[in-house]
Image (cartoon, coloured by chain):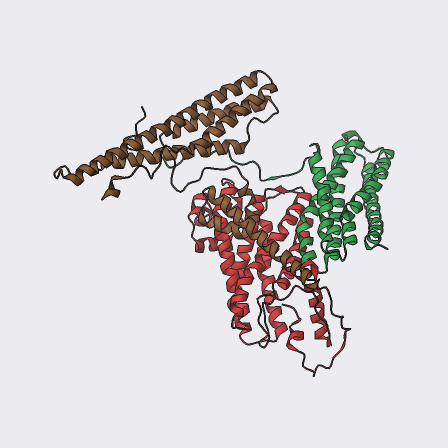
Amino acid sequence: MNSHANSTSPASVSSTSLLALTGLLLRSPERLVDDHEVDLQARLIELAPKLLALTLIGGAAFGVVVGSYRGSIQYLYAGLKAPLLLLLPMLVGLPALRAFLAACELRLSWTRLALASLLAVARTAVLAAATSPVLWLYLSVHPDYHRAVLAMAGTLIVVGVPGLWTLTASLPAGGRNRPLAHAAALAVFGVLLAQTGWLLRPFVVRPRAEIALFRPIEANVFSSLRATQQAASGRYGWEARGAGLLGRDVAEPAELPFEAVDPQVELEPQQQEQGVF
Amino acid sequence: MLAILWISRSTVALALVLGYFGAGAAASMRLARRGHALGLVASAWIAWPLLISVLFSAAEVRSRTPIVGPFGARISQGLASLRASLAEAQSESPLELASQGQLASLELALRQADDRVASVDRLIAELEATQPDSTQPDASTREFERSRQASLLTLRSAREHAADELEQVLAMLLSVRVQIGLHALTSPATVAPVRERLAELETRVAALAELSSFDAGRAALPLEGC
Amino acid sequence: MHGPPASPSYPPSYPPAYAAPGPIATPTDISLPLRSSALIGALAGLIGLGSAAALGAPDLTAGLRLIPSVLLVELGSLALTTPALLALHQFFGLDASVEDLASALARALVRGGQVAAGLILVVVGFALTTDLAIPALLAALLAVGVFTSVVGCVELAAVERRAKSAARAHELDDARFTLLLIGWSILSWAIALRIGLHVARWVIGS
């Protein structure tokens, strides 16, 4: 126990190897920001590169496993994109979290917030890498495409919860109505994670589908989830259109009405691909 | 028209991505100039929004090797006195005489000038320790000795000049402290002279970095002739 | 004549430039005066949120009208409910002064503006990559409204508590104040929704 307590002292953190930092991260990451003797900015300077390295390595490992469903170059594509899947929601959502906490009378420095978020993301990435063998085992038996996507999403949720917990635990005590801020932050990060996953797709690629680094910017994660649900009940016909300022087409295709389609009729691979992730 | 719209959409996307990584590159350069480690500099390229507090914090003197030279103690003393005088004046007047950034830049420039003097001192010591082989007083040995003496002369002259400049800057620090004391005794009307002296000091200190009296190319080391 | 030292010594460090940083987290203090920069920042945040959604507007007119939309809803609901709150508060003989109540509501506006500013990036992301700019704006506006209401109630209760003297610590006063807060919250939400509908019609152009 003493060795664990001593291991977060300022001198030891600065000389800590990546593996040792991983252990600290998994065991008690909030202690890395709770050391009252340390200058937080110095700690951020010391730890930021290492935590980012852990995020990249852990995320890439997770991505490679997800890419194994399709194989070929999807190993590389998914491995490159998975760390972004963890980093982007955090980068976009942090100002919102800070604003929510400020509204709940907890003003904290950007340094502390940045350090807490890096710890959270790195911890999530490391946990994602740790669960990769289980996910790989499941994907290696080639489950149905939708089940594979659910497995990926489920894994991210399972490892994301400790990550979010790390973020909140790394924040200082105090403030009023903090559960409100945490609930709002959870909603924002959840939505951002889902939409980022949609934006960076594909991760899970059907065995016969064409591999691409990114798909066009079209639709959104909510409409695709709705379409998947409708497809599961036999209603096909959803067609993704370009969306947003970056994806909107000038001449948009006519929207096909939803109607019952004979499930015996095999859909085109492109239509099949218009599902989640 | 469609082509123009398509081009403008992808241009916007490209501009956003390039803008993000361009800002990352600028952040990396700023951190590198401040002497931060390579890992942090590389991290800034990807995650610069998280390092905003580091980017815009007061400049600290960072170096992998210590840069305390022969004037180190006097620089520390002079700056500590300056800070104390400024703090005293600040407590009596609402006007800010010097920002933390200015003081940090001043310290950085003085430390770097001190480091340059120390580097020249090390070089002089190495050259003085390098003695030709007196058992074989041939032409090449004489030539080596001539060259060594010439280099030592140049280095000592440059060192003198750099040290004199640094001495004058340290003396100016003292006069700025006197000016601050006058400001504290008189009125806010004397803020302008204090700020002018500080600006003069900054210019003088910046000139320390541009001393051309020490030119490594002119001071040919004796070993280069071998 | 300054000669080089015989053996230069380099101690490993010199005194750091600045003292250790101050507190990491600081709670708000109702006794601190509200800075005008905070108010301006809040208004900028509200306009910024509207501008973010304007990026995803279907046409230029709707986009331009979206820019002040959040500000109109937030300011409108506060502006229309504040006089009623102040008047009833004084009519009930409660303790806090009008100035303190007004500054409490101003702090609530500032917090709402900060929440709006924090959500700008999220709405920009949706506006650039989806057709959900308006739903994202509505969700953000909901968050702004919730936080403004909660902070408003907390700040009003804080100023009332501070003003209340021991001699007047009546349960009846607490009940009236609580009812006043609930009534104000309901009224401000109702007015915000009504203004929101008007603004939405104006943005669409009908």
* Colour red belongs to chain: A
Q: Colour of chain B?
A: brown
Residue lying farthest to the right in this orientation: C91
Q: Quadrant of residue A82?
A: bottom right
Q: Quadrant of residue C182?
A: top right
- Residues B143 and A250: in front is B143
Residue A226 located left or right of residue B166: right
Image quarter in which the C terminus of chain B is found: top left
Task: Identify the residue shown where x is 42% and y is 48%.
Answer: A15
Residue B87 location in percent, x, y? 54, 25
- Residues A211 and B226: in front is B226
- Residues C167 and C121: in front is C121
* Colour green belongs to chain: C
Q: Is residue A118 among the parts visible in the rendering?
A: no
Image quarter in which the N terminus of chain B is found: bottom right
Residue B157 location in percent, x, y? 32, 29
Residue lying farthest to the bottom in this orientation: A264
Residue B211 located left or right of residue B92: left
Residue C133 location in percent, x, y? 73, 56
Task: Identify the residue shown where x is 22% and y is 35%.
Answer: B146
When the figure is inspected, residue C147 is found, relative to residue B84, above or below; the finding is below
Residue C84 location in percent, x, y? 86, 39
Q: How many marks?
A: 0
Q: Is residue C28 among the parts visible in the rendering?
A: yes
Residue lying farthest to the top in this orientation: B186
